[in-house]
Amino acid sequence: MEATAKTFTVKVKPRIGLVIFVSIWGLSCLGMGGFLLVSLVTSLSDTSELYLVSLLLLTGAVFAGNYIRWQLTGIENLTVSDTSLRIFRTGTFFARQLVLKLNELDSVEFDEDKQTPTTIRLYGIGGGKVKLQYLGRQRRFGQDLTLTEAQKLSEELTAEIKKRNN
């Protein structure tokens, strides 16, 4: 009989100052890009190189919207099933996931993340205090956890993996 999967979740703690800044920046990109695009479409002059500028501004607005959505609704998820471990995020436009077979996982540890660049951690887009080592690589999880919470999650995750490997 196959056991059900167990999911560990960590809600992102929003960085309100950055959300406000990125909101203003994203709205500026959207306004400038939209205005430029409308003026290019309605104009008869040949300024085709400005289409690229307009596209870049609108792309910046999309990425700003993605960041804002991540900060306000983001959740890091780690799901353990009988054969695999899956890490993915919800609350973002651009979904990506990592799926590892349980036998590929070398260790689960917790520590203060000193390897992820400070700007990445400051902006809340990467890093974490739970470190998963696999195939000579590592992946971090739980960017907004305290060390105590990371230790507890690491112990629960290790116990769950051991239970499924037996």
Image (cartoon, grey):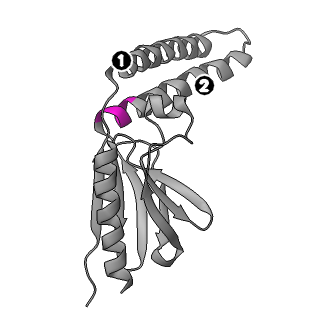
Q: Tag count in the figure?
A: 2
Could you tell which of marks 1 and 2 lies nearer the N-terminus?
Answer: 1
The reply to whether residue 22 is in sight is: yes
Task: Please identify the quadrant where the N terminus is shown.
Answer: bottom left
Q: Nearer the viewer, mark 1 or mark 2?
A: 1
Task: Please identify the quadrant where the C terminus is shown.
Answer: bottom left
Q: Nearer the viewer, residue 137 or 36?
A: 137
Indicate the position of residue 90 as horizontal and vertical percent values: 35, 48
Which residue sits at x=31%, y=30%? Answer: 14
- Residue 33 occupies which quadrant of the picture? top right
Q: Nearer the viewer, residue 44 or 8?
A: 8
Left/right placement of residue 42 relative to residue 96 reads right
Q: Which residues are magenta?
A: 68-72
Q: Is residue 131 magenta?
A: no
Q: Amino acid at mark 1?
A: Gly
- Residue 20 occupies which quadrant of the picture? top left
Indicate the position of residue 10 as horizontal and vertical percent values: 30, 48
Q: Residue furthest bottom?
A: 1
Say which residue label 1 marks.
17
> Which SS class for mark 2?
helix
Q: What label sits on residue 129 in the rendered view?
A: none
Q: What label sits on residue 55 in the rendered view?
A: 2
- Callout 2: few (<14), some (14-19), or many (20+) C-alpha neighbours within 10 Å? some
- Callout 1: few (<14), some (14-19), or many (20+) C-alpha neighbours within 10 Å? few
Q: CA distance from mark 1 to mark 2?
A: 27 Å
> Which SS class for mark 1?
helix
Which residue sits at x=26%, y=81%? Answer: 3
Q: Amino acid at mark 2?
A: Leu
Which residue sits at x=33%, y=54%? Answer: 151
Indicate the position of residue 32 as horizontal and vertical percent values: 52, 11
